[in-house]
Each structure stands twice: as C-alpha cells, then as structure tokens.
Image: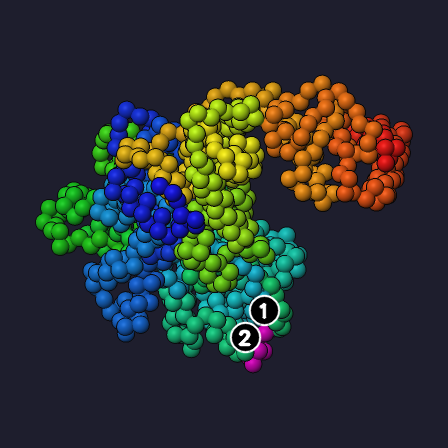
Amino acid sequence: MQISEKYSPRETESKWYSYWLENNYFHSKPNEKPPYTVVIPPPNVTGILHMGHMLNNTIQDVLVRRARMQGFNACWVPGTDHASIATEAKVVAKLKSEGISKSDLSREEFLKHAWAWTEEYGGTILEQLKKLGCSCDWDRTRFTLEPKMSEQVIKSFVDLYNKGMIYRGYRMVNWDPEAKTNISDEEVIFKEQNGKLYYLKYKVEGSEEYLSVATTRPETIFGDMAVCVNPEDERYAHLKGKNVIVPIVNRVVPVIEDDYVDIEFGTGALKITPAHDINDYEIGKRHNLTIIDSLDDDANLNSHGQHYAGKNRFEVRKLIAKELEEKGLLLKAEDYVNKVGTSERTGAVIEPKVSVQWFLRMSDLAQPALDVVMDDQVKFHPEKFKNTYKYWMENIRDWNISRQLWWGQQIPAFFYGDGEDDFVVAENFDDALQLAKSKSGNSDLKISDLRQDDDVLDTWFSAWLWPMSVFNGLLDTENKEIDYYYPTSDLVTGPDIIFFWVARMIMAGQEYRGEVPFKNVYFTGIVRDKQRRKMSKSLGNSPDPIELIEKYSADGVRVGILLSSAAGNDLLFDEELMLQGRNFATKIWNAYRLIQGWTKDDTKKASAADKQAIDWLGHQMAKTVTEIEDQFAKFRISDSLHLLYKLIWDDFCSWYLEAIKPGFGESVSNEVYEQTIVYFENLMKLLHPFMPFLTEELWQNIAPRTADEALVIAQQPKITEFSTEILNQFEITRELVAGVRNYRQSKGISPREAAEVFTNAESFPNTELIVKLANISAVNFASKTDEPSFTFLVGGTEVSIPLSESLDLEEEKRKTEEEIKYLQGFLKSVEKKLSNEKFMAGAPQQVVDNELKKQKDAQEKIVLLTGKLQTL
C-alpha cells in the first residue's frame, strides 16, 4: 500500500505499541535460547519521567531490543521503588493539607493513607516509559514493597543478623529534621554557606581568666561537655587538669587534651559537644564524656536548651549570639564560609545526632565485591569508574540500615522486655515468640507481650536484592527463573548511585548466590543544559519529556538523546538534536516513498552501473555491521548510532538510491527493485532498536506480515566478510563524482549539462556508475586536452573537464593565478618548517610525515594549475 506523503508518529506509535503488547513480544519465559536479562533501576513509585530517565531507559531498550533480534531470550524486568523518605514526605504533606498530623495517626492508619497515595499516583512513570517505546516484560512488573519482595528483604535481614553481620548500637547519625529520619553518609550533600565564626568566652573556674573558643554553632553550647586543646599547644599547658564554665549554661566542664585539635585553627581551643558533632562524639568516647542532646527531632531546642526550649536551632543561633554579646561573653563574630551537610532528599541542613540504630557490618562483604570489579568479572563502562569504586570500597563504613519512618519494611526485631538486649530477630511474630520464650526463660510469654521495632529498613536494603528478588531468588533459591535469568547481563545506571546501589548489589549477589549479579555496568552521564547545569525541576531548565515526544516523536527523541551521549560523559541537551532525530525519520520515510513510487519492469535487466552500486552497498553494509558490533561490545552505543546514521543517510539515501534511480519516465528492473527492498529491510532491522516505531511501520508496509514475522522479533543481519578493495574503489568513485559536481557548482553550470572528461588514467573503477552519477558524456582515458579546462586530482589521477563555452575565460585566468599565488605562499611556509633542523630533530615522525605530505600535495597542485593557466 502506498504510504502517505507525511509520516504521522502519534498514530503509528500508539498502533504498534498496542500490537506488540497484544502479541506478547516483550514477555519472556525460560527456554532453550541463551538469556539476556536486564533489570530496570526502579524509579520512585511516585516519580514522573525526567531527562535522566529518558536517557537511561532508551539505552536499556536499545540493548534489549537488539538482543531480542540477535537470538537471545530477552527479559527486561520493570518495577518501582517504594522510596521510603520521598514517599512518606509526600503523604505527610498531603495529610497536613487536610489538617491531619502524622502523630495523630496510628501506624496502621498512616499506612492506609500511604497505600492509597501510592495506588493513586504510583506507576505513572511506567506508563510514560511505554510512550518512549520501552519493551519491558510488563507481566513481570515488581514493586519493592509488595508482599513477596518484602518477605525476601525480611528473610535477608534475619539471615544476616543470625550470621552476626547485623548489630544494634548507639552511633552518631545524620539526622534529617524535615524527613524526621536518619540518612546515610552517601545521602548527605555538602554545600558552601555563608555564616559567622563566633568567639566565645569560657571562664576558667576559680580565676578571672577566660579561654576563647571559636564555633559556628553557638546554639549547641547546651550540650558542651568539655573544652579540648592540643597537648603540644604551650599556650594552654597551664590549664591542664583545670575546668572552665560554659557561658549562659554555667556548667563546669574539664579542659581535656587530644591530638585531634588543630593548633592553627581558630584559637586552638575546641568546645566538645558529643551529641552534635561526629568528631566531638569520637573525642567524647575517648575521654568518657557524658552525652547531652539539646535538640529534638524537629531540630528545636529541648528542655536542655533552658529558656530557648521549643525554638528552632537557627532562630536560637541569632538570639544566643545577641545574649552572649549583652553578657560580655562574645569576643567577636567574623564572616565565615562553611561547608554544611544537607539532605539529598529534602535539602534540610543535617543535624548530627546520637541514636540507637541498626547497622550492617561491611568489611567482610566489601572485599569480595571489590575483587570481582578489579578483575573484571563485573566490567565497568567506562573503566574510569573502577578507581572511584575502589576508593569507596577500601574506605567503607558500616551501613546504617534503619530509618525512623513507617513506610517501608518494618525491622523484624521483637522486644519482650525493657532491657536493651531484651529482643529477638525473626521473620514473624510466631517465630519471635518461640525465640523470646527461649531467650528469656519465660514460657508464659504471649504474642501480645511482643513489640516490634518501630523503624523501617533503608530503601536501599531492599534495592540491593533487586536482581535476585525480582525472580524470587531468596524465597526459592533454586527456582527455574533465578537459575535461568541470573546473573543478569547488563546494568544501565548513573554513576551517582555507584555506592548506594551498584556496590551493594554486587555484595548481595556474592553473599547470597556466590556470583556477581550482572556482567557489565554501563554508566550514563548526567543530562545538562547548554550552560552545563544539571537539569532539575528547581532550576526550571528541564523540558517535559512527554511534550518532547509529542513534538518530535518517540523515535526522534530517542535518536536525539543518543547521538550525544557517549558512555560516562555528561550529555549537553540541545533541542536541536531532537529535531535532527525527527528529520532523520522524515529522510527514511521519504526514501521509502521514492522506492515505492518506481515502476517495475520484468523484462528490464540491471545495468552495469546498477550492479556496481548493488555490489558496493552490500559490502558497505557488511563493513558497518561489523563496526556496529564492535562498538556495542565496547558499550559505545552513541558511536553505533552514528555509524548507522551515516550508512542510511549518506550511503543508502545519498549515493545508492541516486545510483540506481531510474530516469524520468523510466522503469526499474525487478532485480534492482527487489535487491533494494532487501537492503532497506536489513537497514530497518539494524535501526529498529533505536527507532522501533518508524521501522515497524515501514516493515509492515513492505509486505504482508504474520505475527511471527513482525520486525520486533526479526533477526538482525549477521557479521559477514566484506571486500576492502571494493570499498576503496568506491571511495575513488565518490571522489571522482564529487570533483565533477564541484566543477559544475563552482562555475554555476547546470547539473543537466553533460561533461566530457579527459584523464591520464588507463581506467576508472565503476566507470559506468561514475558516468551516470556525474552525468558524463564521454571519458577519454590516457588522454589530455589542450582546451582551457577545470582540472582536479584524485590521488595520482589527473582529471580535466574542458570549460563550458559560457564561461568567462579572463575571470577563470584571474582565479587560477590567485590560487597558484596562495599555494606558493603555503608551500614556502611548509618548506621553511622542513628546513628547520631543530623541528626535524624534535618533532614526532607522524608530524614530519604530515608536513611532507602537505609539501607534495601543494607541489602537485601548483603543477596542475600552471598547466591549466597555459591552456587559458
């Protein structure tokens, strides 16, 4: 059927995505084929598509569709993450807008609201991925908080606890007062902020002497338990063993000595507040200091804050500075730029806080996970990220896995008494009761006597099991699916979660299955705007991906975003790239329309020029297929697309179709038409992973296809041998044709005016093809013309075209003289460089060779133009 004049992506995309789903092409079951498995980095359940998702999921889809078309049983598992902190914050905000406080609800009541929110807003992003063309196995969609996924998380916690790898203890944590939970070190973003450095007076007990102490946080003095100096600091040697009085608080605290204190910083005296600074906490432990926490969970001063109780920490900072000044306890305040830790999720300034938390020992898990990356059992693309990974793994700290939230997997620790150790860890209440009876020696305990820990597990504690848990690998360790699909093949993710997720998945895979969870990790870059700023909603510099799809088509956006996204390098987003993608689709559509419009003739034979073009393109396609395979093996997906883009736009559309195109009113031979369709089909097979909708539409139009013959499951061309000689010969053909066309263009001569050619060559490769493409009336081999002519070189071959009678010979003579003059000047500069002994002795051989080639080329052109000038 004749295709329409214009391509209509919206209609096409909807039609073919529905067709693919109806025919279950994306669904995978274990079979005799080799598996190709990809698990999606699960986006937040309440998230919406942004440019980072677009890049990441387009790359995944290209890999999955290509594997499917190369004979693999491709399985792409989609899903979403429950995102404890982000989702709970949204639910709390929604409830607040309705006049409901979380503190007024029971856990069960709050979770009902959270599930309702999730069901209403969750999963939007997965529907948006369908618009992009993602070929996920939607029957396998998982959610990290669904029952079977949670069951596996709890099972792993109990297992690790029983192995002695999980423990409970007091630690200094990063408290997010907005989300009201602790967060890991990796979730803290340090930002420079302008503040003040306050110099406070700490009176030495029993004397009139004052010790000056510098701090950026005067509001924390209510937790001061000591003043610390360096034991080598002679200024304070006389204070050893003495006490000082904390200003306003009037608490008497000791002067202690510790090597941690920098003699050069501030006054060399440091106030020690163990509850509010990680370094103070460590010093406090070494010197057995008491801990007084003067802030509540909202980062307001508590009862220890005396008359400031109930006020926010930043408000108190201003008020207390004023009070200190009024009481003569503030020496001075200087402007100071400080790096302040903020929460990645909420942006709130982090408050160090001592708290009872659950931790996972990382040292034993880290070494095997480091080894498999260093010896390339897991390959990083690009490889530079191995160094980042190595540094982190060698400096790893125990993982704080508990969060003070309700949305998430509740920690399976059950308390039966008031003591700190009066708890057991079990998968459920029934098992916990038996353990509690045994541990306590109290056989009268009932389930109602047990209280489960209120905290939930860090979201990443479920995500680190993802490649196994999506196949229920921790519930049934030898089920058919986990044995077939695991380890997965390739992981596509961002380098920003190399520690949060990638490293931890490798640890979990080693721990639970004794093998790596994936073979390759492809790190995408960050999508940035033209000013190199990271795209974000807050900056307002991120376009809506769905609007881009509607404007430029899904295929256009996919091509546009991939053309500029080399692995691991940031992508500078430019909407012009989307336009380039759309124009590429239009080019392909019009190329097929052109072919479709030709009249076929059973009796007509292919000409010599047709056969030469067909022969060349076959070898050119074979060469490109080999190069594409090599680029994919190196995860250079952008480079693969560039190769294919050139093959279609330049080689097929610009050269091949021009070479075989019948003249006006003429027909094309069946042989040529059928071979052209074969080539076009192969191009659609190669292009399908990048542009699935357009290619399926054209594929289905070429011939009637059954469901078993859809492009989505067609097999791509395999690597075959190609002739370098034939390809090199065509490059000469291309240059010869370009030279003749350049003659016409530079002289303003119509392409329809045939040209006669004289050459010193005995023959041309593809003579018939050159004659057709360049519109040549005759080729005079081994001949020279005495007429004024346009002459050019192709390698060592000289080609002359007698000038058209309509040309102004005097003007041509003037231009030729100017060109000779320019080349003589250029040659002089090159020869000066080559006569410089210092240059010749010190320059690399390749640089010298380049200069010698410039010299030779210039000399040959001058000889050629001098001959031309004589004929003029």
Q: Quadrant of residue 182?
A: bottom left
Question: In the drawing, does residue 840 fall left or right of residue 200?
Answer: right
Residue 438 at x, y = what percent?
16, 42
The amino acid pointed to by label 1 is Lys
Q: Which residue is mark 2?
A: 321
Q: Which residue is mark 1?
A: 196
* Viewer-nearest residue: 470 or 207: 470
Q: Earlier in the sequence, mark 2 or mark 1?
A: 1
The amino acid pointed to by label 2 is Ala
In the rendered image, residue 548 lying in the magenta stretch gets the answer no
Please give the label number shown on residue 218: none
Q: Quadrant of residue 786?
A: top right
* Viewer-nearest residue: 683 or 3: 3
* Separation of residues labelled 2 and 1 (CA atoms): 10 Å
Is residue 267 at least partly visible in the picture?
Answer: yes
Q: Quadrant of the C terminus?
A: top right
Q: Tell me the magenta residue range.
A: 325-330
Mark 2 touches mark 1? (CB < 8 Å): yes
Residue 175 at x, y = what percent?
41, 59
